[in-house]
Amino acid sequence: MKTAKILAIAALTLSGFAVSAQQKTSFGIRGGVNFQNINGDDASGGSLDNKLKVGFLAGVNAEIPVGIDFYVQPGVLYAVKGAKNDIGDTKVNLGYVEVPVNFLYKPELGTGHLLLGVGPYIAFGVNGKIKSGGSEEDIKFKNTVTVAEAAADPYLKRIDAGGNLLFGYEMANHLSIQLNAQLGMVKINPKVEGISNDQSSWKNTGFGVSLGYRF
């Protein structure tokens, strides 16, 4: 009886690998609009009072089959994040090169495929600007700053990382629409030397919608 069970499990496993082998790695492009914010706490521990800002994303990805209807989907995107605040009509624009790696479930649904995914991302800040009261400054990237540096220029950490969720649908013509949500899990504000009671904790968050095409 045990032998029969082992053979049955082996047959199912081999059939899964056979179907997976018939699936090929594919490549796609994606672009869309983001609604981004910077949430968290200020220096005294109070909640930040920022608001959503419109940004965009564009990039490429691959879908690597790992099982029946399951894929690993790595990608490279350029994403504009940030936030806005009513005080001084302040707007923060942050440009990141982002590398998401999603675990994707893609079963057939109607004439196309449902898209359900989750996974981590890491992002590298490449540029940024802060506009306030008619003036504009470039954001600099540094993990630790002095009090003098913090007073003279706006600084953020270069590395951002967190998690992705996605839900969408890919049509038979390989066009797709996708809803995504993103939660930053690391602080993007630098440490200020000499200040021991600074409770600042700023994190990127957002959601958006994008269109894609798979070749």
Image: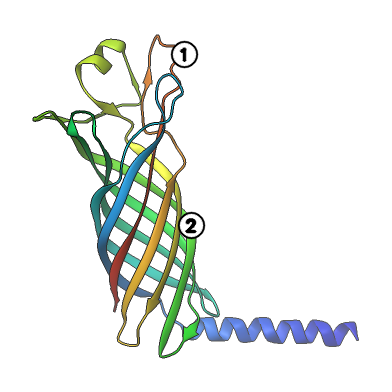
Q: Residue at x 53, y 81 (%)?
A: 20
Q: Quadrant of the C terminus?
A: bottom left
Q: Is 36 left, or right, of 47 in this rendering?
A: left
Residue drawn 38% across the image and 31% down it: 48
Residue furthest out toward the front = 86
Q: Secondary structure at mark 2?
A: strand
Amino acid type, label 1: Asn
Q: Which mark is residue 7?
A: none
Query: Which one is nearer the viewer's eye here, 206 or 143?
Result: 206
Asked which quadrant contains residue 190, the reply is top left
The single residue placed furthest to the bottom in the displayed view is 111
Check contact, mark 1 vs mark 2: CB within 8 A. Answer: no
Name the residue type under label 2.
Gly
The disc at residue 119 is 2
The spot of residue 69 in percent (x, y) is 52, 79
Q: Residues within 10 Å of mark 2 (few under 14, many from 20)?
A: some
| Quarter of the figure with residue 13 | bottom right
Separation of marks 1 and 2 at Cα, in angstroms: 34 Å
Location of residue 151 with respect to 215 vertically, above or below: above
Residue under the point 29% across and 55% down: 34
Residue 197, disc: 1
Residue most toward the left? 134
Residue 26 x %, y %: 36, 76
Which mark is in front, 1 or 2? Answer: 1
SS label for mark 1: loop
